[in-house]
Amino acid sequence: MSQLIGRAVVMAFGPFEATSHHISLKDVQAWEEANEPVREGDIVIINTGWDRHWKRVPEGFDYLRGWPGLSGEASAYLRGKNIKAVGIDCISIDPGDVSGADLKAHYEFLPNGVLVLENLTNLDKLPPVVLFAALPLKIAGGTGSPVRAVAIVAEGDSRV
């Protein structure tokens, strides 16, 4: 459970069109230089603005087309920083144009013990650093779970 609670950096990229944008290592490093370096033990949250596509059908199908995600190089870099977890506001941490063996972010994070959180929302309301907790349901034998994602923001430090 300690992997799901801690300091989180909230990286903002985009907004993106439905072109399956790959967030690059260069993008991540530029964000760190302009904001806050990722530290060992951090949780990294990726705000792409993609949650704006989450709607009821038929408009809601746009959420499932061409979402952005982390490139393999960016994923390897973040894993190399010994982060605890990584989250994104899309249906997958990998871009929408990849599948199978090309799911570089999944294959970089999960086998190395970095938990993946997907379908997060309201990330645009958060500052670059927050205290974050993802509270999963206890599901016997499960490989995943819905979570209650909570960010605690210091007074006066919110974008709201």
Image (cartoon, rainbow, N blue to C red):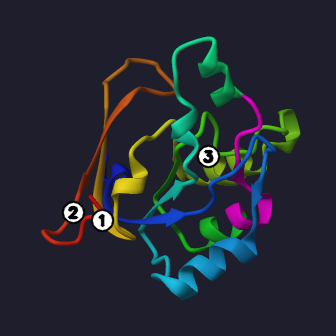
Amino acid under disc 2 = Val
- Residue 153 numbered tag: 2
Residue depicted at x 58% and y 53%: 48
* Residue 51 or residue 136, whichever sits in front: 51
N-terminal-most mark, 2 or 1: 1
Q: Helix, strand or loop at disc 1?
A: strand
The span picked out in magenta is 65-75
Asked which secondary structure carries label 2, the reply is loop
* Residue 15 percent location from the top left of the image: 62, 54
> Disc 3 marks which amino acid?
Leu
Amino acid type of the residue that numbered disc 1 sits on in the rendered structure: Val
Q: Nearer the viewer, residue 17 or 111?
A: 17
Label 1 vs 3, first from the N-terminus: 3
| Any part of residue 118 in sight | no
The residue under label 1 is 130
The quarter of the rendered structure image containing the N terminus is top left
Q: Residues within 10 Å of mark 1 (few under 14, many from 20)?
A: many
Dot 2: within a 10 Å radius of its alpha carbon, few (fewer than 14), some, or many (20 or more) residues? some
